[in-house]
Image (cartoon, helix red, strand yellow):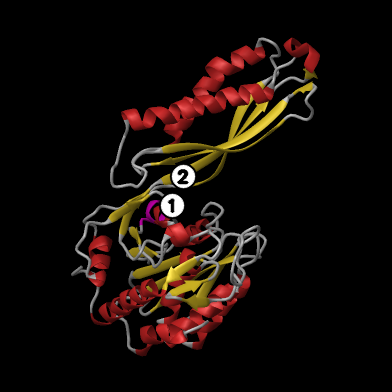
Amino acid sequence: MNDVSTLNPELTDMFQKLVAFDTTSRNSNLELIHFVRDYLQDFGVSSELIHDEAKGKANLYATIGPDDRPGVMLSGHTDVVPVDGQNWSTDPFSLIEKDGRCYGRGTADMKGFIACALSHLPRMVEQPLVTPIHLAFSYDEEIGCIGVRRLLDILQGRAIRPAMGIIGEPTGMRVINAHKGKQGWRVTVKGRAAHSAYTVEGVNAVEFAAELICHIRRVYQEIPKHGPIDAAYRVPHSTLHVGPIQGGRALNIVPDHCEFSFEVRHLPHETADHYLQQVMQHAHEVLEPAMQAVDPQTSISVEPLAGYPGLGTAGDAQVVRFCQALLEDTREPDKISFGSEAGLFSERVNVPCVVCGPGSILQAHRPDEYVDASQMKSCWTFIDRLVERLRSSGLESS
């Protein structure tokens, strides 16, 4: 890393090591997880690994300080998105600092936050903590918040769970108390093949899929008109979006099969099923009768894909006040349209969470991903204050 003097040496070293692990979601994250496990063990901190079924990936959970009481959880995902097809001007798996920016895959999303947490370990253990710090590092967040669910299964059976959680997604070190939920589905349209010279003998699966996609667009167009609306979000309402579509084999064959995927990103007090019902009602009441008038074996079906709940932590919740005090930030907490694991921690194990971390989501997933060095310094100060606070007091006064 160039110009290493701009960041704390311990932070620089940890950040370099984390970025160097290629933890693209298609790969194992065990090399990174084992590095973290061994690093914690060097300071006398034991950790628990919760693996996936194939034993090729793992979550890590550790408690620093007393283990008989709930504390503050610092949480982040270890996987990153691919660099395939992106035009990088630097090696994506080498940390490069230039003009006040730290470049590399995962710098913003979200190894910068994890590096800040881990590089504070010497400070966390040098004096006893009154209130513990929990570390929770997950896998496969980028493909639907999949890995953390195994960790949540374990935490559900624990008498001691974190009192609050800070999910270190890139927010510019703003406290985020709410984000949208997401749910995706795959729609399969089963038609009837025929020679294209005799289209009346067939049921064109591509055309009926297109009609349903147009209805999805109509459902979406009504939301800005009728709400609900929450102006605190950059996109102030729920959204529907159609993604990949595949169908047909040759131009002279009426397609008998078509698949497409769509998603709903919804405000936290709404449900994705509310919009799914509107889509599938049209499929079952309008489109399928027309299809089955030609062939009763035709159909439109739907299966769920990855999803996660929204986050709706109260603006005056203890975790919000606690983090704002550490940041010395008197502004109202913000809301974001992208998702995180925070909603799952809140919904599944009743751990109230905020999202707060260095960097901008606008730099994530892009070539030459970066986080500003100034953001890393702000995060370092934030966790430094957290450690000092937990050395001297509990959470009751926050």
Residue 40 visible? The answer is no
Mark 1 or 2, nearer chain start: 2
Query: Percent x, y for residue 350?
Result: 36, 55
Stretch in magenta: 346-350
Q: Residues within 10 Å of mark 2 (few under 14, many from 20)?
A: many
- Along the line of sight, which residue is nearer the eye, 397 or 338? 338
Q: Nearer the viewer, residue 9 or 187?
A: 9
- Up the image or down, 25 lies above or below 310; here it is below
Q: Check the image and name the residue furthest to the bottom.
A: 126
Q: Quadrant of the C terminus?
A: bottom left
Q: Which residue is mark 2?
A: 182
Give the Cα distance between marks 1 and 2: 7 Å
Above or below: residue 222 compared with residue 263 = above
Q: Nearer the viewer, residue 398 or 159?
A: 398
Q: Which residue is mark 1?
A: 339
Which residue appears at 33% of the width and 64% of the height? 164
Depth check: 339 or 393 in front?
A: 339
Question: Can see residue 234?
Answer: yes
Magenta-span inclusion, residue 347:
yes
Q: Position of residue 263 (x, y in %)?
A: 51, 39
Do the CB atoms of the residues marked 1 and 2 lie less than 8 Å apart? yes
Question: Is 185 rendered above or below residue 74?
Answer: above
Secondary structure beneath disc 2?
Answer: strand
Amino acid, disc 2: Lys
- The residue type indicated by label 1 comes to Gly
